[in-house]
Structure formats: C-alpha cells, structure tokens
Image (spheres, rainbow, N blue to C red):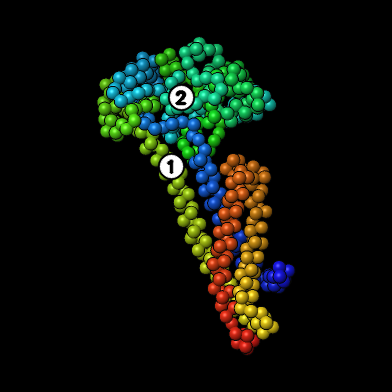
Amino acid sequence: MLRHLFKLIWKRKGRNLMLTLEILLAFVIVFAITAFAVRNAELYRLPTGFDASDTWSVFIQDPSDANDKFTPELYDRYKRGLESLPGVRQVAFGSASPYSNHTMINDFVAPAGGKRIRTEQLEVSDDYMALLGVKVLEGRGFDRSDDGSAATPVVINRRMATTLFGTAPAVGKVFDTSEPENKGRDMMKVVGVIDTFRKKGELDSPDNFMFVRYNPLVNIGNVRFMVVKLAPGTERSFEETLQRQLKLIRNDLSYDVTPLSSQRKEVMSEKVTPMIVLAVVAAFMLVMVGFGLFGVLWQNTTRRIPEIGLRRALGASAANIYRQIIAEQFLLSSMAMAAGLLLLVQLPVTGVMGDSLNWGVFAVAALLSMAVIYLLSLLCSVYPGWRASRLSPTEALHYE
C-alpha cells in the first residue's frame, strides 16, 4: 500500500511540489512558535533563586547625578530611618533590584584556559541576599569578616562556579576579572556559591551570575537601589508613608517606590506580549495554509475523477478511496516535515542558539508541530476525500 502511494505521489510530483513546500513552510513556522513557547514554559518552572513577596524596591533618583552625595552617613540614615517605620522589617542596598532593567555585565578571562566569560553582576550590601531569601549552598554570604579583605568578596552561582573551576570546589578560590594587561588589579575571592539568581524573574534565561560585596557604611559609591521587606499584607497606600520618610532624610532627591510584585507583572507582560503576537500571526498563517491545502486537494481530487472511477469499477469501496486520499496527504506531510527536521536539527547540533533550543525543547517542539501539521492535513483532506468516495463509478468513468 505504501509503495503504491509513493508511486502515485511521484507521478504527480510537479503538482505535489508546491503543496510539499507549503507544508514545509507551515511546519517551520509552527516549530519556531512552539519552540519559543516550550522554552518559556521550561523557564517558568525553574526556580528564580529569590523570594519577592512583601518586598518593595526604592530607586533613588538624583537629577544632578552627583555621586559624592551618596556617603556612608547617607546610607546609614536611609537604613535607620526606614527600619524605624512600623511595618518595615528590613532594608538592604544594591546596584539593582529584582525585575529592574538596571544590568551590569562584566567580561573577564577564566583562570584556567583563558576562556572569556561574560557574567551579570550585582553589587549588594551584606543583608541583601538574606532579605530576598537567596540560599547559599556552599560557603557563606557576606558579613563583617570580609572587611579589609585584599580581594573583593563575591558569591557566584553554580553555573559560573562550574565555568570557572569545573568540578573543583569554588569556595576560597581567588580569580582575576581584569584584562591580561591589568592582571592582578581586580581580584575576586569566592566566599559562597548559590544555585541560581534570575534577576528578571521566571522567564529569564539562566546565566553566569555574581554578587559583589558592597559595604555602604564604609564605601562612597553609586548604589541607588534599596529593597525593603515589609510586613505581610501591607497595602499599596503605605507608599505615601515611605515617600514622606524618604523626603525627611533627603528632600532634594526623588524616589521611585514600586512593589516587586508590580515590577514582576510588567516584566511578565513584556515577555508574554511578543509570544501572543507571534501566536496570532502563526494562527493566521496556518489558516491561510489550510485554505491553500484545501483548495489544492479539491483541485487534485477533481482531476483524478477518472482514476477514482476506474478503481471503483474494479471493486474498490468508498472507504478505500477515502483512506487513500487521506493517506496520500499524510504521506506528503510526512515527507515535508522530514525535510524540515533535517534542516532544523542543525540548530541544537551546532548549539548556535545555546540553551534556548536544547534537545529537550527541540524534541517537544518537533512533536507538537508535527501533531499540528497532521491535524491540519486531516482537516483539509476530510471533505475532498469524502467527496471522492461518494462518486458513482459510472459517473466517474464518463467524466471528461
């Protein structure tokens, strides 16, 4: 049966070529959308590495951008002033807060092999990680024992530890983040290792990450973010109280106060909106492809009326004709998708898209895309197949 179907398809290869290319294009489009959705679903299930519940972000805006204003005394006043408010549990400082768009990327050369490593880093006070519930798996977090350290204390995620030191323990290791010509000027000492910290939340791709210790009570710097842990159930109206207290500390500065839950919604909306737009475009294109397949199958069936009539005259049942039309369409779809998979499999093989298209995502996206194309082929071939099966042998044999 299969051999016979191949012969029929090959004899009409000119007509079937455009149909096969149309199915191939539809498969590639569906695969791209599906892979994007599957990867985001995979990311959503991964831990973010922090707990943002009942936590607000305060960004200190300085119109004059005078960094010298941010003295240890000012940071101390902010911490004492906010923690004195009823409902405020803890205050910590950082160069960014979770879900914020402020990002610091640093490139450096690995101590072994000279491999260039890109990592996101965050300058934080000693209590920043504890406030956000970041769990240290190996070693410890920052504390006063790090004061006066010759190398800057850092806490890195497991991914970065593996990149830097392989399977060897990372805690206690010292590495240099400076360029080879400036070697020895920017030494970092690993005091702890965490599992992960995805600053942009659930849909952020895991990558190298490093917390760098910043002591706001000693150093003069430009750390503009505060994360404030509040009592559970604190209403948004508490922002007025917080703003009033901040203005009492420094009236010449402005403050952007936002619950991390609100920032999370904004980030999720930014990530999900393109997915919805792509899904709508893909659905529209599938409808167009469906109409095209239906029209081609209708035309092919009409041209094959004499062939169908002869088969009916030789004893083929209506069910046999019906199954033949649908089986031919499924075979054409399989050939088109096989060609598509041969092209698409190069992406995970070469690793050109990194973790965004790993083998797990590729397999799930391929299976779901194949199911969509098979369903589309079935829907488009049902009526032409039924119409062909209803032809009377005598009527078909007299068709011109």
Residue 131 percent across, percent down from the top left: 42, 25
Q: Secondary structure at mark 1?
A: helix
Tell me the quadrant of the picture where the C terminus can be found.
bottom right
Residue 234 percent across, percent down from the top left: 31, 31
Residue drawn 62% across and 65% down?
A: 330
Q: Within 10 Å of the Cα at label 2, are there few (<14), some (14-19), or many (20+) other Cα atoms?
A: many
Residue drawn 58% across and 74% down?
A: 385
Answer whether labels 1 and 2 touch (C-beta < 8 Å). Answer: no
Residue drawn 65% across and 23% down?
A: 168
Residues under labels 1 and 2: Cα distance?
23 Å
Q: Within 10 Å of the Cα at label 1, are there few (<14), some (14-19), or many (20+) other Cα atoms?
A: some
Residue type, label 1:
Met
Residue ID for mark 1: 268
Residue type, label 2:
Met
Q: Is residue 60 above or below residue 265?
A: above
Residue ID for mark 2: 129
Tell me the quadrant of the picture where the N terminus can be found.
bottom right
Residue drawn 62% across and 81% down?
A: 305
